[in-house]
Amino acid sequence: MTASLSDTAPLAFSAEVAEARAANHPIVALESTIITHGMPWPQNVETARLVEDDLRTAGAVPATIAVMGGRIHIGLEAHELDALGQASDVMKLSRADLAACLATGRTGATTVAATMICAHLAGIAVFATGGIGGVHRGAEHSFDISADLHELAQTPVTVVAAGAKAILDLPKTLEVLETLGVPVIAHEQDDLPAFWSRASGLAAPLRMDDPAQIAAAHRMRARLGLAGGQLVVNPIPPEDEIPRAQIQPVIDAALAEAAAQGVSAKEVTPFLLARIFDQTEGRSLTANIALVRNNARLAARIARALQDSA
């Protein structure tokens, strides 16, 4: 008998997730870089718990994913979440770093790409996040393109996000997703959302308003033998958005400052987010929390629809 991926991978399930797996209840994966690299303690853990509770209220079980002690944790116990939220020197894990982090016993937080890999290993089909990575501005010179895009093209997980992060080159990101064959499905609107803003000015390639349709498309890809997952782009609630006309000058100023200071590679995104936080007097972080929670609620509905059609 051939071992399954979950049998061979070093996975550790929380008690809640293990119980959900045994009872065949819907589970939604959550990333952990928002905890370790996105917010300070204790707001990071408070936000993580809010998102987990949103999933429970919406009828799904949360599985926050992180690497600790040489194992991939699928779901974190309360003390593990607290420890991760206060940990220092945490690796930011993508596909390239995941195995090395496990082999060396370090602590690592999963990005979109790494969370997709781990979710798939654990048999979880739906993942809620804030925004995906994409093509950075100036990528024609720097070749700075997030591994998230290639992961979406090869790992069969439906990812619910508020679009790509608005600091990125959104037209080029959409072009790369199209080239890689990744379905980009807007929920309840025709425009591609832009993270903090509901509209980007770009038309979304696909639109589906019913979570059952999104679940059916996920299953149809598997039936057709198509590699990769789906990107469901879910706009931030109207009352929480920062309109594009307001946020774009702030983004442009932060980008110019990063270029002037020679900020590059993995340091670009955290630098830009910190400057935008300062310039918006914290509104960007408030919006970020709102959109992550909104994405979790939609992800729960998709996971429930997948479970109902199983």
Image (tube, rainbow, N blue to C red):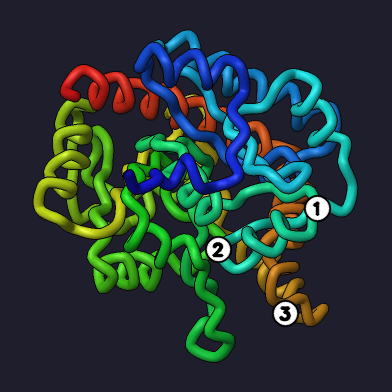
Q: Mark 2 points at which residue?
A: 95
Q: Residue at x 75, y 42 (%)?
A: 68
Q: Earlier in the sequence, mark 1 or mark 3?
A: 1
Residue 302, horizontal then vertical, whole percent: 30, 27
> Can you name the residue that lies furthest to the front here?
1
| Left or right: 106 as drawn, with respect to 139 | right
The residue shown at (30%, 51%) is 229
Q: Which of marks 1 and 3 is in front?
A: 1
Considering only vertical position in the picture, is 150 above or below 216? below
Q: Which of 122 and 240 is in front in this view?
A: 122
Type of the residue with mark 1:
Arg
* Mark 3, residue position: 259
Work out how far the residue at label 2 is from the one at label 1, CA to CA, in angstroms: 15 Å
Cα–Cα gap, marks 1 and 3: 32 Å
The residue wearing badge 1 is 106
The mark nearer the N terminus, 2 or 3, is 2
Spatial distance from mark 2 to mark 3, Cα to Cα? 27 Å
SS at mark 2? loop
Q: Describe residue 270's horizontal placement relative to residue 98 as left or right.
A: right
Residue 219 visible in the shown view: yes
Mark closest to the chain's N terminus, 2 or 1: 2
The image's mark for residue 119 is none
Mark 2 or mark 1, which is nearer to you?
A: 1
Report the label total: 3
Q: Which amino acid does label 3 sit on?
A: Ala
Crowdedness near tag 1: few (<14), some (14–19) or many (≥20) residues, C-alpha within 10 Å: some
